[in-house]
Each structure stands twice: as structure tokens, then as C-alpha cells.
Amino acid sequence: MSTPRIVEANFIKSAQSIADSLPEDMSEVVFLGRSNVGKSSTLNGLTQRKNLAKSSATPGKTQLINFFETRYLYNEESYPVRFVDLPGFGYAKVSKSLKEVWQKNLVEFIQHRVSIRLFIHLRDARHPHAKIDDDVEAYISEFIRPDQKYLTVFTKIDKLNQKERSKLKREFPESITISNLKKNGHSRVHQNILQTIFGVEYNSNSKQEDA
């Protein structure tokens, strides 16, 4: 059985809010996480496009909702999906008024965007119990729809030793761990995306280990 892979990935547009976003005509995977968690690196790694998502040298500076249209190829079948990169949260050095607008726009988007099928919450494996991450997960669980799924993905797993990795997997058994540096763990993210949106099933032998 082949491994799912992305054969097309293109940036489409940026939006400030749900009002100027793309039409809700394609299933969407939303990537959210704290500033500096590695969202851009994850998007580039998953799509195998080195500069598809641009990371900012200044945390908190990327404040737009960015849309990317991608196409998977799996067992000779084509599966189109839209990736949505949300601004990083939890960075203090933004003006109060901007932060209020930013949060309002993001809240409105994640609550009311009908085309969202999967939330991928990126968390730093070195700080697995960060309160802001726990708060975001609790918040989204309040309104997530039955046709949506929430997936926790820990980045920077290569920064942990084996004992720390084992502890993380015990504490978060449903999560996926990845290393964008070593390009490990991406296949399980792809599998979750295709299972959630298209109902593509995998036998147990086809699943690869985490990073």
C-alpha cells in the first residue's frame, strides 16, 4: 500500500477575518499553535515545499489567516484539501488594540467557519503542559462539531531524550509527535487528514511510527 503524499501545494491568499476569507467550498485543515512552535516549518515539511509558508523573524508578526490549496495522491486517487495557517497565539509584544481585533477575528473564524474539518494544534514537545495550550484545547472543545476532529501534534520531538519521549506518549496517547528537522512523523499527520476528511482507511501495517 502506498504512502499518501502531497503532489501540489500553492498559496492562494491571506485574509484578516472570516469576512474576506475564501469561499467555503473545500474541506479545510486548520493549523494553530503558539508563536515559535514551528507552524511554518510543519507546513513546509508536510507539503515538501521549502518556502511555501513564510516564518517571521519577529514572533507575533504574522497576523493574517493564510490559505493554501493542496492535493494529495494516494493509491492513484486524488484528494484536494485546503490548509489554513492561523496567526500564532500567546505572544505579548503586540499592541492591546491589535490583540483584541486579532483574537476576535480568530475566534469568529474557528467558531463559524463551516468548511473546517480538522483542527491540528501544534504544541512544543519541550513544554507539553503550557497553560495557554491547555486553555486553547479546552476552549475549542466547547464548540467543536461532530463532523470535526481535533488532533494534537507535538513539534520539536528531536529535542527530547528517550525517557522524555516515553513520558510524553504516556501522557498524550492520542497525539502525534514530529520532527521537522529530521522529517519524521509527517506520514501519520497525512493519514489523519485523509481519514478525517475523506474516510480513507489504513490497515495497521501501513501506519508508520511517530518521530
Image (cartoon, grey):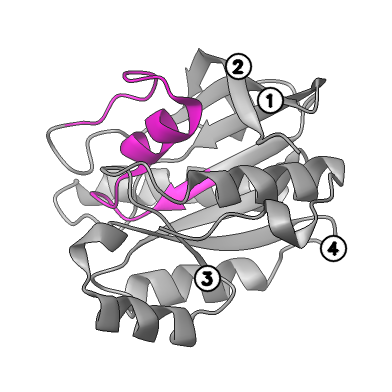
Q: Nearer the viewer, residue 149 or 100?
A: 149
Name the residue tied to disc 4.
Answer: 146
Give the residue at x 78% y 49%. Answer: 195
* Mark 1 residue type: Tyr
The numbered mark, 4 or 2, whose residue comes first in the sequence reads 2
Magenta stretch? Answer: 31-56
Element at label 4: loop
Is mark 1 in CB contact (under 8 Å) with mark 2?
Answer: yes
Task: Report crowding for label 1: few under 14, some 14 to 19, many 20 or more residues within 10 A (C-alpha).
Answer: many
- Left or right of 154? Residue 97 is left
Q: Which residue is mark 1?
A: 72
Say if mark 1 contacts mark 3, CB within 8 Å. Answer: no
Mark nearer the N terminus (1 vs 3): 1
Foreground label between 1 and 4: 1
Q: Is residue 210 magenta?
A: no
Distance from disc 3 to disc 4, alpha carbons, whole Å, reads 16 Å
In this view, the residue in front, 88 or 40, is 40
| Residue position for label 3 | 137
Where is 149 relative to 16, above or below? below
Q: For mark 2, give the secondary structure.
A: strand
Where disc 1 sits, the SS reads strand
Q: Is residue 41 magenta?
A: yes
Tag on residue 7? 2
Q: Residue at x 70, y 28 (%)?
A: 81
Residue occupying image coordinates x 71% and y 34%:
2
Marks 1 and 3: which is nearer the front?
1
User: Mark 4 is on which residue type?
Assistant: Pro
What's the distance in space between the residues labelled 1 and 2, CA to CA? Answer: 6 Å
114 w.r.t. 7: above or below: below
